[in-house]
Structures are given as structure tokens and as C-alpha cells.
Amino acid sequence: MSVKKSILGLIFASMHDEAVIDLTKKRTMGSIPFAGRYRLIDFPLSNMVNSGIKEVGVITKSNYGSLLDHLGSGREWDLSSKHGGLHLLPPFSHVDSGIYRGRLEALNGVWDFVEHSSAEYVLMSDCDVVTTIDYRKVVDYHVSSEADITVVCGKYAYDSSKNQSATVFGVDEEGRINDVMINPQISGECCIGLGMFVVSKAFLKDIVVACASRGQYSFAKDILQARKDDFKIMAYEHDGYFSKIDTINAYYEANMELLNTENRNNLFIKSSPVYTKIRDNGPVKFGLESEIKNSLIADGCVIEGKVENCVLCRGVKIGRDSVVKDCVLMQDTVIGDKCRINSIIADKNVEIGDEKVLTGSETYPLYIGKKAKI
Amino acid sequence: MYIKKECVAMLLAGGQGSRLYALTQKVAKPAVPYGGKYRLIDFPLSNCTNSGIDTVGVLTQYQPLVLNDYIGNGQPWDLDKLHGGVHVLPPYQTSAGASWYEGTANAIYQNMSFIERYDPEYVIVLGGDHIYKMDYSKMLDFHKKNEADCTLAVFDVPYEEASRMGIMTCDDQYRVLKFTEKPKQPDSTLASMGIYVFTWSKLRKYLIENENANTGSKDFGKDIIPAMLRDQQRLFAYPFEGYWKDVGTLDSLWEANMDLLSPSVPLDLYDKKWKIYSRNNNMPPQYIGGSAEVENSMISEGSDINGKVDFSVIFSGVTIEEGATVNYSIIMPGTVVKAGAVVEYAIVGEDCVVNSGAKIGMSPEAVENRDEWGIAVIGHNVDVSEGAKVLPKQIISENV
């Protein structure tokens, strides 16, 4: 039985920024462009809204200009509201908190905001996992299993040799977590954390206060790992499609995976739309000699050449007689005429002139920084 | 409390658009989809916003549900304002009784109290069925400079078309000397675009007089403009250059969509300085599959294309299966074209299903007698059954 519970959503927009350092030089994890027309934060934010959460705080650290621009008043997520709504929580909200070192310190810094909310439960999410999930089910599970903390987990082919990072959990038959490994040197299918947690507000307050007094700041180390025997920490297994963005290769692959129709249908579910900032572009225009195969294309693109196995963000332009394969091109990238472009990730506003040849490898795509002119 | 506005726009959106047949059976003409992601009303609304006019009354009457939903609070056009903004104005009952809007002038007359709340100097009257980008503030400047009582936007049309339009004869300062509806022998090619700027005090007087005279038509073109000319008021024609298309008929709606695919047509939907805004439907990017062949077309969000698409405008959420062919056609939102179906020279409405083997429309070359050729049209929510044939010029509004 599901009882309607009041839930406060908290999104950590800057957690894991260091995992994809190229992409977060001038932005947060949450504002990385993804799947053509989205930013990573759109996924947790839309999941929260679609799960009936009406009050969301977004915790940032640094480089959050693009994030503020993207979120605005929260109107596009239906979070521009008199009661609750979207709250941006930059780190300066507390004089004594400074720049936080971990999740617990971040929570301590924004505690006044959390305290002010009348919600009984707090759902926390990072931005490095792309998925569609109903958080109501997670909270119901948290309540019915009488957990202190519920961690959303997923089955995942983890491989530390690819520089992946993850929190790997051991789970007993009842679903209780009995082992917590942070970035272990192993490979194979594991139960990994998806960076989403449910706790009651009262419990969260206790641990935030207790850890602050001891100078502890890491939720994974100081709570999940150190206190797994004291607290009842339950694993909620999310069996839906997800991708985890913890390296630039993983970012590339997560985009490419969406060219598979099944993956796409599992991420973009009609009953839970993914909301994002509107740009009011024209529709995509395909020229007289365009040829497109197996590509995901966002609004406002103008394509005159050949495109195969690509993810194109909004406003990308591709010139005549150019051939673009296996690429992720972010907003407003312009590729001239007669180019041959293979396996690159072009950040926003990259300009590539006529008759250029650029080739990365499918296993190691070439990254081109924001506003580069080639 | 109302803050004074220099200019209020009144958008006439109540017309049935009966010449669009199946496409306007259940929706008002200004809500008809156009250009892959727009509805006709996006053009005048976006023009208002881009011209700095932030107070717009939209007069609705015929089938307003879709239109009302679409306009909502006006936010997509930046018309959700503390002062002004967009207001939907249906006819209403008063202590004197109730009546429908009887004509364009009567519709404005019935909403004089809406206009007066803003105490404007000028009122601009717009239609909801033209595709164009126009800076109304320049027209307003022209009106002020001429100390005009009324300024009518005009478009220079080919001589052979002039006899179907309202034609303005002007002196060399563009002062209007004569206005003739559908002249048999036109002495000018300046056609009225149905866009009027009035000095409000003057328009107010003529609206009341016209109402009392009870001419039976209560129309701007038939009554107000001729009456102002008779009284030698200062009427000026404001020449508009650029793309302007009346989409009053099925053929012209099809042509206006095809114009978007022509590199020589000067209607730029990608101009960041003059965006055309529309209500967004939160769909993922479009996917073009491995078996797709897409050329010279315009395609919108959420579409899934695996078939052949050539010279076509595809709206959002459309599925075109592998083995389906769409040529020279317009496919409106949510429609599915199944494998083996062929759609040529056609308009297919919203949320239709074209089953496999169905054949809609034909190319002009495939028709023996050219007079029998025309666009095939499928209305909204229609199922076209397996193997069904829809001939050129046929208009279908029920399942076949």
C-alpha cells in the first residue's frame, strides 16, 4: 500500500565533477549536455517531478553559471511555485560552511533549507546516472522495510581497469547492505550504487550533526561504510535502463547507447517525460543531398551532408559533402563543407572549417573543447 | 489597477477557416499545425512579442478548445505578464443580452471595454491565418509619422491575383485614395494583408457608428475602412516586403509548408533575432534509423523515421516505418505511417494511422488528366485501413 508521503528532493549537481574533467572545466556535472537536447540534471529533476516531488533543492559547488542559466526559475520542470518549487543552493548559503568536501558537509551547509521544508523524507540524487525511475516506489520500499537509509542500486558490468569509479555493495537475502567497497580493483557484474538515497529528515539531521562535530564529511565512507552494522541500510534494486557517466569514454558510450531503439524506449517513457529548457529553435532541416543513418538529432540542426551513428545537440550545422560518423556534437557545433569527421566529441560552439579531416578512435574519441576553432 | 499601454493588439482568431475542410472540423484555423512544430497563431503572437507589444486580446469563437489550451497563459510567447499579456476573449453575455461575434468589427466592438482598460493610443488588429515575420513597431512608427488615423499593411501581389484581394489605390505618399474589395479591373496591385493600425479614439468612434448603422456585415473591409475613406480620414498603406502567405486553402497550406524546403524562400525559422515561439511538448530528439532515407525535408522532435522521406514536413512524434514512403507531403503530429504505405502530395492530420499498403495521393505526373490532380487530405484522428486508396483532391475526415 502506498501512502502519500511528503518528500524533499535534493540534487547534488557538482558531485563527481572530477570524473569527466574535460566536460566540467566550465560547468557542473549537472549541466553537461546529453542525448541531444538535455543536460544531465534534467533526468533526476524530471524523475522527481514525475514522482510527485514538488520541492527540490539543487546543491552546487563551483562553475555553476551554466547550471543557473539552464534551470532559471524551474518553470520548465513545473517547479516555479509559491509552495516548494526549485531552490538553488550555492555553497555561500552559510558563512561558516565554506566550500564543502563531501556530501555531509554540503548538507550541513544547506541545512537551514532542509530544516525549513515540511517534508518527512529526503530523496538525494547525483547527476552522473542517466535513468528513468519512479522515486515513489523507492520511498515506499524505504518505509515498508523500516530502513534507516535506502540506497538505489543497479546491476552493472563494472571494470576498474577502465578507470571507472563506483561504490559496490554486498547485499544479503533481505536486501540489507552488508558490504561497501569504494572504487574496488575488480571487474565483473556488481551491484553498484546509482547515487540516489532515501532517508527520513529526522535521521538525516542526526547524522549530519553528528558527523559535523567529528569533522567527518563523506557519506559513503563515514556513514555507509563505517556504520553499515549500526544502521539498517537497504538496497533498492532499480531494474530499469541506466547509464553511468564516470569517464569521458563512458559519456560517449552512454550517448551512443541511445541509438539503440530499445535503450531509447526504456529511457524515454511516454508517461514520464524528460523536461528541459526550451530554446525555440526551428525543426531540423535536411538538405537536398543529405543522407542520415542511425542518428539522434535535436531541434534546430541544419544538415546538408552525410551523418551516421551520431548524436547531434541543438543547432548543429553540417555542410555539404561532409561525412560525419560516430560523433557526439554539442550545441551549435558548425562543421563546414567537404569534411571527414570520425569519432569526436565536440563541446559547445566548436567551429570546424571546410575540408578538414578529424579522426578519433571508437574506443578513445577525440575531445574538442568549447568554442575551439579548427 | 491597469497601467496604460501605448498599443494593444487584437487578434481575430474566431474564424472557422471552412476552406481547410477536414483540418478545421474540430479546431479553429489559427490552431492548424504548420511548419513542423508551429501552429498558425504562433506567427502573429511571436511578431507581437518581437515587436514589443505585450498586450494581446485573442478573439475566439469557433471550436476554441485546442486553441485555448495552446495559448494557455501565454508563457511560450513571453506573454504571461503582470501588466497586459495575452487574454483569450470569447463572446459573453451582458445586461443588454448576448450575441455571437457578427463580423470582424463587431468582435472588436464587443471588446471595447477590454481595450479601454489599457487606455491605449493605438490598436493593432491582426488575423490568425497568415505566415509572415513583421515588425509591427515599424508599422506603428509609420502610422505616427503620417499622423494617420488608420494604416493598412499592404503586399504587392501579381496583377492576376489582385482581383481576388482587397486592393488599395494610393498617392505617391502612400495615402489611400480608394479601397476596392475584389476589383474586376484592379488599378493597383497593393493588397490589404488584414493588418490594421488604428488611432484608438478614431476606431472607437467608427465602431460605435457602424454598430448603430447596422449594415449587416459589421466588417473592417466592408464597413469601417470605406466609412473612414468617405469621411476623408487619413488612411495610409504600409508596404510590407518579405515572405507573406495566406494559408486559407488546403493548396496554400501545402504550398506554404513546401516553401520552407525551398532555399530561395525568404522565411528563416532559424533567425535568433526573430524567433518564432511555440508551445513545446517535451519529446526526445528525433531518431533517424539505419534504413531511413531522408532528403530535403524538415522533421521535428520525437519522430522516429525508418522509411523514405523526401520533400516533406514531418511534425513531432511521427513514426514512419521501414518500407514506408512519404514524398511532397505534410504529416502532422502523432501520426504513424506503417510499412509499405505510400503518401504523396498529401496533408495527413494529427494522430492518424496510415496502415501498410495504403496509398494516399499521387504525383501530378501520374495523373492522366491534370485537372483531376490536387492535394489529398486526411483529417485528424483518421485510420486509413490496409490497402486503402485516397485519390488526389480527395478529403477524408472519417476512417476509411
Image (cartoon, rainbow, N blue to C red):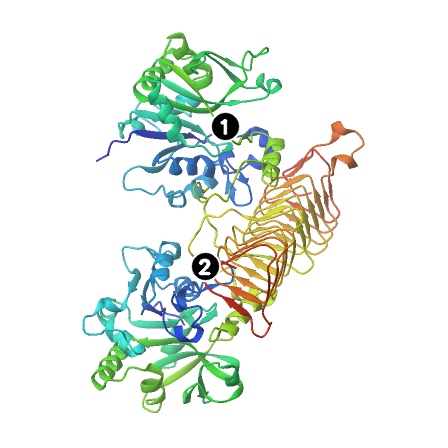
Q: What's under tag 2, amino acid-wise? A: Lys
Secondary element at image label 2: loop
In the picture, measured across the screen, residue B343 lies left or right of residue A237, that is right
Q: Are marks 1 and 2 in contact (CB under 8 Å)?
A: no
Please state the horizontal and vertical placement of residue B11, each as a whole percent of the image: 41, 31
Asked if B358 appears above or below A159 in the picture, the reply is above
Please state the horizontal and vertical placement of residue B67, each as a whole percent of the image: 46, 39
In the picture, measured across the screen, residue A177 lies left or right of residue A354, that is left
User: How far is the residue under mark 1 from the one under mark 2?
Assistant: 36 Å
Q: Establish whether labels 1 and 2 are both on one chain.
A: no
What's the chain of the residue with tag 2? Answer: A
Residue pointed to by mark 2:
A371
Quarter occupied by the N terminus of chain B: top left
What's the chain of the residue with tag 1? Answer: B
Secondary element at image label 1: loop
The disc at residue B241 is: 1
Residue name at image x 42 percent, y 25 percent: B101
Crowd tier of the residue under label 2, counting other residues whose Cα lies within 10 Å: few below 14, some 14–19, many 20 or above: some
Please state the horizontal and vertical placement of residue A227, each as a whole percent of the image: 32, 89
Crowd tier of the residue under label 1, counting other residues whose Cα lies within 10 Å: few below 14, some 14–19, many 20 or above: few
Please state the horizontal and vertical placement of residue A31, each as a whole percent of the image: 41, 64
Residue name at image x 60 percent, y 40 percent: B263
Residue name at image x 50 percent, y 33 percent: B132
> Which quadrant holds residue B329?
top right
Residue A203 is at least partly visible in this image: yes
In the picture, measured across the screen, residue B385 lies left or right of residue B63, that is right
Quarter occupied by the C terminus of chain B: top right
